Image (spheres, rainbow, N blue to C red):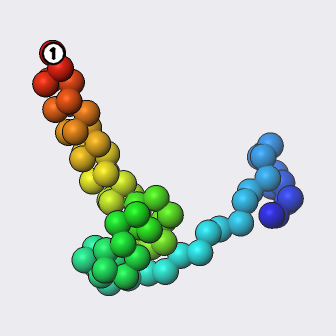
Amino acid sequence: MSDEVRKGERIPRRPLPEFEEVANFGEAMTKHGFWGTALEDKNQYGPISMMILLLVVATVTGSILKLLA
């Protein structure tokens, strides 16, 4: 871990995670899987897959709440 604190910053920066660029979202899913892309940020499509995960979780939660109401 880098303990270097730059001018104007109070918290030291952490080292960058491993990152691999892929051509498209489909290749990201086949190479790293949904969990690897969404939760472990193994490629540049991490934020997109995290939004899809949020949409799925929100839909399931809303459906359960609607059924219980």
Q: Tell me which residue sits at (34%, 77%) in the image.
A: 28
Residue type at tag 1: Ala
Side (left or right) of 22 relative to 69: right
Residue at which label 1 appears:
69
Side (left or right) of 26 relative to 15: left
Q: Nearer the viewer, residue 41 or 57?
A: 57
Q: Is residue 67 above or below residue 56?
A: above
Secondary structure of the residue carrying tag 1 is loop
| Quadrant in which the N terminus appears | bottom right
Q: Tell me which residue sits at (85%, 60%) in the image.
A: 4
Q: In this view, does 10 lie above or below 35?
A: above
Indicate the position of residue 21 as horizontal and vertical percent values: 44, 81
Q: Tell me which residue sits at (29%, 42%) in the image.
A: 57
Indicate the position of residue 39 as horizontal and vertical percent values: 46, 59
Q: Tell me which residue sits at (74%, 57%) in the image.
A: 13
Q: Can residue 14 be seen in this view?
A: yes
Q: Can residue 45 be seen in this view?
A: no
Which residue lies most toward the top here?
69
Side (left or right) of 33 relative to 52: right
Q: Which of 69 and 11 is in front in this view?
A: 69
| Quadrant in which the C terminus appears | top left
Q: In this view, does 23 lie above or below 3?
A: below
Indicate the position of residue 23 as horizontal and vertical percent values: 32, 84
Side (left or right) of 11 relative to 66: right
Q: How many residues crowd around disc 1 within 10 Å: few (fewer than 14), some, or many (20 or more)? A: few
Indicate the position of residue 64 as horizontal and vertical percent values: 20, 30
Q: Nearer the viewer, residue 5 or 49?
A: 49
Q: Is residue 17 above or below residue 23?
A: above
